């Protein structure tokens, strides 16, 4: 019996990609947030040095990796953990999609996601037959809620939740007996400053207890490791133990060389700062070009995207950009309330960002 899953939304973008490629000067792809800059050499060297990986790696992660994750949370997020509170994953997407399965959710359960939501939250619920409620108001979360997804900084709109909202969300989730998870993958890409955005594991949020609370993170964005599939989860020790037990049975284990590369990446903040400044420069130029071309930029205070609108149907905007050879994503991929917004990615080379700005200027 086949799973009843929605059509893959990106397939509907294919004709617009073809339209953009037909531009005389070629395609500028600002649709997918896939890094274009090189993986830092010291990370690649760590991977290469670990390629004699003849033994099975640990599902829980090597001790050096778990210690590196613990150290990163302490240094960059102000969160104190032990190695029993962390676990690596094969990127963050598989963990997000499988979370309802790993937690044993079923058809009578509800998964809450943001009103504007990364589609994988709903896919994970669909895999186990759970219902999905889209809501940003903890007071609206139903009594049979078993899993709550928060996404801060958010994909697609780059909004950031402060300590007060995160605290209220944790309080409500605990009242419901639900697990609450913040997808924090863009935390180091904060355009209001150099410090990461607040973690759901911040002591001011959780009130001295990690019970029912998890943080998910990925090195794809901060370290250009999208191809390595390098992610991790941290928080409630009981939940980590539960997730680990199931993952051992399934065999969901990050490869040993990738674990070694993650140790290197997590121990070096300089490369993250350098990458952040590259994106900051690209963001400034692209923001100016879009604004001059008549777009309004909403939220977008963190992350790798600009959330833009000019008050028309998103697909019309996608088509107009495609005629300029620029591919972007309609907001409707992320929720019904975003039918007039378009997501524009910063993950393009400096040359392509400048070319996109020039094409936007020529359209005025």
Image (tube, helix red, strand yellow):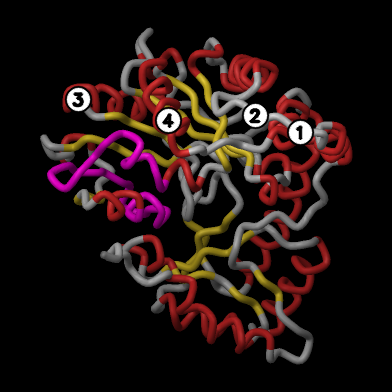
In the image, residue 293 above or below residue 224:
below
> Does any portion of residue 336 appear in the rendered image?
no
Callout 3 crowding tier (Cα within 10 Å): few <14, some 14–19, many ≥20: some
The picture places residue 193, in percent across and down from the top left corner, at 64, 33
Report the residue that reaches farthest toward the front. Answer: 54
Question: Magenta stretch?
Answer: 97-123
Horizontal placement of 102 versus 145: left or right? right
- Residues marked 3 and 2 touching at CB (< 8 Å): no
The residue labelled by disc 1 is 53
The residue labelled by disc 2 is 57
In three-dimensional space, the C-alpha distance between marks 2 and 4, rounded to whole angstroms, equals 37 Å
Asked if the stretch drawn in magenta spans residue 196, the answer is no
**Residue at (31% x, 41% y) in the render:** 100
**Residue at (35% x, 55% y) in the render:** 123
- Which circle's residue, 3 or 1, is located before the other in the chain? 1
In three-dimensional space, the C-alpha distance between marks 1 and 2, rounded to whole angstroms, equals 8 Å
Q: Which mark is residue 177?
A: 3
In the image, residue 54 above or below residue 332:
above
Rendered image quadrant of residue 119: bottom left
In the image, residue 208 above or below residue 193:
above
**Residue at (17% x, 35% y) in the render:** 139
The residue labelled by disc 4 is 162
- Which circle's residue, 3 or 2, is located before the other in the chain? 2
Q: Secondary structure at mark 3?
A: loop
**Residue at (46% x, 29% y) in the render:** 215
The picture places residue 260, in percent across and down from the top left corner, at 75, 29
Rendered image quadrant of residue 333: bottom left
Q: Which is closer to the viewer, label 2 or label 4?
A: 2
The picture places residue 318, in percent across and down from the top left corner, at 51, 78
Q: Secondary structure at mark 2?
A: loop
């Amino acid at each position: 019996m086949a799973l009843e899953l929605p059509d893959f939304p990106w397939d509907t973008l294919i004709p617009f990609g073809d339209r953009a490629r037909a531009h005389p000067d070629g395609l500028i792809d600002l649709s997918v947030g896939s890094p274009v800059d090189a993986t830092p050499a010291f990370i690649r060297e760590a991977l290469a040095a670990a390629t004699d990986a003849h033994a099975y790696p640990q599902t829980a992660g090597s001790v050096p990796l778990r210690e590196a994750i613990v150290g990163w949370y302490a240094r960059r997020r102000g969160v104190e953990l032990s190695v029993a509170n962390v676990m690596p994953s094969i990127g963050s997407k598989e963990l997000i999609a499988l979370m309802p399965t790993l937690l044993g959710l079923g058809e009578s359960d509800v998964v809450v996601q943001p009103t504007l939501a990364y589609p994988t939250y709903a896919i994970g619920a669909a895999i186990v037959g759970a219902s999905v409620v889209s809501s940003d108001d903890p007071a609206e979360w139903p009594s049979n809620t078993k899993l709550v997804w928060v996404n801060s900084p958010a994909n697609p709109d780059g909004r950031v939740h402060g300590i007060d909202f995160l605290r209220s969300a944790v309080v409500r989730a605990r009242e419901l007996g639900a697990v609450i998870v913040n997808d924090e993958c863009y935390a180091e890409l904060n355009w209001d400053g150099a410090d990461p955005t607040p973690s759901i594991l911040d002591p001011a949020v959780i009130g001295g207890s990690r019970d029912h609370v998890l943080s998910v993170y990925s090195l794809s964005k901060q370290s250009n490791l999208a191809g390595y599939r390098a992610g991790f989860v941290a928080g409630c020790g009981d939940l980590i133990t539960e997730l680990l037990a199931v993952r051992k049975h399934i065999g969901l284990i990050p490869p040993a060389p990738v674990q070694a590369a993650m140790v290197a990446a997590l121990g070096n903040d300089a490369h993250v700062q350098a990458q952040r400044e590259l994106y900051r420069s690209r963001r400034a130029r692209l923001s100016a070009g879009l604004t001059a071309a008549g777009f309004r930029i909403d939220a977008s205070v963190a992350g790798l995207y600009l959330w833009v609108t000019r008050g028309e149907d998103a697909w019309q905007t996608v088509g107009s950009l495609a005629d300029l050879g620029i591919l972007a994503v309609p907001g409707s991929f992320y929720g019904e309330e975003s039918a007039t917004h378009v997501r524009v990615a910063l993950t393009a080379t400096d040359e392509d960002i400048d070319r996109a700005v020039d094409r936007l200027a020529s359209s005025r």
